[in-house]
Every structure is written in C-alpha cells, then in structure tokens.
Image (cartoon, rainbow, N blue to C red):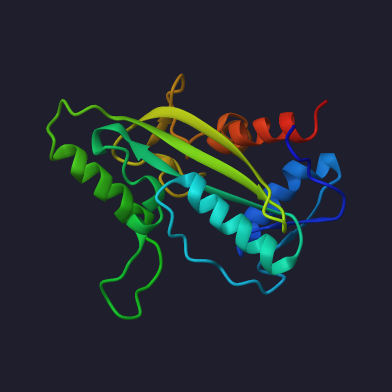
C-alpha cells in the first residue's frame, strides 16, 4: 500500500513562487499545508539525473532530508519523437543564454527555434509528433517515496502562436485540438496538461479510498 501524505506541512521543492501557488491550489482541497523550499532557505540540488523520475526524486529527497518534513517535487519537459526524445530532461537547458557575459537567463523563443531548426534539417517530411511529460515525486525524511507520471501527446507547429503559455507552449498543439497550449484558455490547458494527468494519479492514490 502506498504511503499517504500525513498531517503537517508539505515542502514543495521549488524556489518559484508561481509553481508553489499552482501546486498549493491543487492540494488545498485536501487540507494539505504547502510551504516552499525557497521560503525555508533550502539549497537547490544539482539535477544530475537522466530521466524525469530521477530528477524529481533528487529534488524531493533533498528537500525532505534538509527540512525533516515530507516533500513534493516535479520535473517536466518536452520530448520530440524525431529528435530521439530530446530535449527531454534538458528542456530548460536548451533555453539557457550563455554566450555573452551578463546575458544569463532563459530565451524560450531561442529554444523553440532550436527544435524547429533541427526538424527542418531533417526535411519537410520529418514527423512532428511530440509530448510533454510531468513526474511528481513525494519523499519522506526516512527515505520512503512515491512517484506519479503524467503525459500529453501532440505535435509541433511553426511559427509560434499564442501569448498565454510559457516555455514551448506556443509551438505545441495537443492531440484533438487546433490551438497551441499558448492559445488555449489557461483553465482549459491546465485541465488536460501533463501536470494535470500526474496530479490526477497522485490524488487517486493519496486521497481517495
């Protein structure tokens, strides 16, 4: 039987206020009191895994061990079939600007362009199938853990469309839709996303009899 999230605070292994707000809203109906790793001053561990599961567990375990509390982490990204699953766990890395001193940060248009350029290099007939993955990992200070995986399939389009998403959303068209993630109403996107899929599995396992 899967170990359940107990009473007390749940550390969300992030320093991103937006991600804390999103996850807290999803867990609030179940009486879970969330606090971020950032607010506790916990360091961010190096994400040295080669899969989403490995990186999610690295972050969750680091937060649980450092805080002495149960912790939840997520790891997500875009995989492109014609690129052998890349960028995958390196989704954010492909957006890093590192060429010029003082120009650090992420450029998602650059990252989308890199993917498109690699697809175009394969010719007009290159398949454009892709999928977003999300892994949620819960870890306890004693080393126990639980993992939930979500996914949504779709295809890539060019040029980018829409302003309501982030990351690679403007070039991703989910299966069964004509709009990109960045063109969909945020509520509609969140209802069908890879993160929603993973959270549905977490809720079914953690909070439903």
Q: Position of residue 37 (x, y in %)?
A: 67, 65
**As drawn, which residue projects farthest toward the top?**
176
Q: Quadrant of the N terminus?
A: top right
* Residue 76 in view: no
**How many marks overall?**
0
Q: Quadrant of the C terminus?
A: top right
Q: Position of residue 201 (x, y in %)?
A: 66, 31
State the residue at coordinates (40%, 62%). 106
Q: Position of residue 41 (x, y in %)?
A: 67, 74
Q: Viewed as shown, does residue 2 lie left or right of 104?
A: right
Q: Viewed as shown, does residue 197 lie left or right of 130?
A: right
Q: Viewed as shown, does residue 128 lie left or right of 173?
A: left
State the residue at coordinates (48%, 36%). 181
Whether 167 is drawn above or below 180: the answer is below
Of 180 and 204, nearer the camera is 204
Of 33 and 60, nearer the camera is 60
Whether 178 is drawn above or below 28: the answer is above
* Residue 153 in view: yes
Whether 94 is drawn above or below 208: the answer is below
**Quarter-of-image position of residue 34:** bottom right
State the residue at coordinates (44%, 49%). 167
**Quarter-of-image position of residue 190:** top right
Q: Position of residue 138 (x, y in %)?
A: 67, 48
State the residue at coordinates (33%, 46%). 87
**Quarter-of-image position of residue 85:** top left
């Amino acid at each position: 039987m899967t170990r359940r999230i107990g009473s007390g605070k749940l550390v969300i292994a992030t320093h991103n206020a937006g991600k804390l707000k999103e996850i807290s809203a999803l867990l609030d109906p179940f009486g879970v009191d969330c606090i971020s790793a950032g607010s506790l001053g916990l360091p961010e561990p190096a994400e040295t895994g080669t899969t989403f599961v490995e990186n999610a567990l690295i972050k969750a375990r680091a937060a649980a061990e450092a805080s002495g509390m149960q912790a939840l982490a997520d790891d997500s990204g875009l995989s492109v079939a014609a690129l052998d699953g890349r960028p995958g766990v390196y989704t954010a890395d492909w957006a890093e600007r590192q060429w010029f001193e003082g120009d650090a940060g992420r450029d998602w248009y650059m990252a989308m362009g890199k993917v498109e350029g690699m697809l175009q290099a394969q010719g007009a007939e290159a398949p454009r199938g892709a999928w977003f993955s999300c892994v949620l990992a819960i870890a306890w200070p004693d080393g126990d853990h639980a993992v939930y995986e979500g996914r949504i399939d779709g295809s890539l389009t060019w040029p980018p469309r829409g302003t309501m998403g982030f990351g690679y959303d403007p070039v991703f068209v989910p299966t069964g839709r004509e709009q990109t993630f960045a063109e969909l109403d945020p509520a509609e996107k969140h209802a069908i996303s890879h993160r929603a899929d993973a959270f549905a599995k977490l809720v079914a396992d953690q909070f439903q009899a």
